[in-house]
Image (cartoon, rainbow, N blue to C red):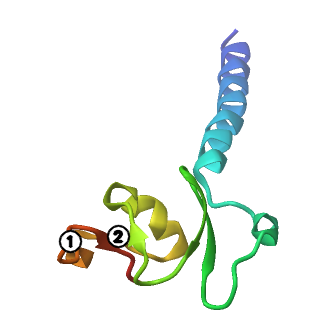
Amino acid sequence: MLGAMRRLAVLLVAVAIPFGAAAFAQSAPLSPAASAHSCSGSYTHAHLPWGQKCLRAGQFCKLDGDRHYHRFRYHCHRSGRDGSGRYHLSR
Ligand SMILES: [Zn+2]
């Protein structure tokens, strides 16, 4: 009987792993194929939760979106605030 219990435990673990992997995959960066829609010159095409954007250092940005800019190696920090209270992207 102990053998059957062990098999059941192994089965449960085997089922649980793919679920965890799927959850992880959802938060992973997008595939390169998604960049088919391109931006000109020095801009970086980015899929952000609020839409597709062409990013470049110095552009206006959303302070609370900083963690999303990180995926594209940009930052939107308080230090990027200008005289009129708007924030700008930095690398
Ligand atoms: Zn940042």
Identify which residue, 30 or 37, lies in the foreground.
37
Residue bearing the label numbered 1 = 84
The type of residue carrying mark 1 is Ser
Badge 1 marks a residue whose secondary structure is loop
Q: Quadrant of residue 83?
A: bottom left
| Residue positioned most to the left | 83
Q: Quadrant of the N terminus?
A: top right
Residue at 66% from the left image edge and 49% from the top image edge: 25
Mark 2 belongs to which amino acid? Cys
Q: Secondary structure at mark 2?
A: loop
Q: Is residue 27 above or below residue 86?
A: above
Using residue 45 as the reference point, say whether residue 85 is left or right of it.
left
Relative depth, front residue between 42 and 69:
42
- Report crowding for label 1: few under 14, some 14 to 19, many 20 or more residues within 10 A (C-alpha): few
Give the numbered dot on residue 76: 2
Give left or right: position of 16 versus 70. Answer: right
Point out the quarter of the image occupied by ligand 1: bottom left
Q: Where does residue 34 sit, x and y in percent of width and height?
A: 77, 63
Residue that extends furthest to the bottom in the rendered view of this protein? 41
Where is 28 relative to 46, above or below?
above
For the C terminus, the quadrant is: bottom left
Counting from the top left corner in percent of width and height, residue 32 is at 76, 70
Q: Is mark 2 within 8 Å of ligand 1?
A: yes
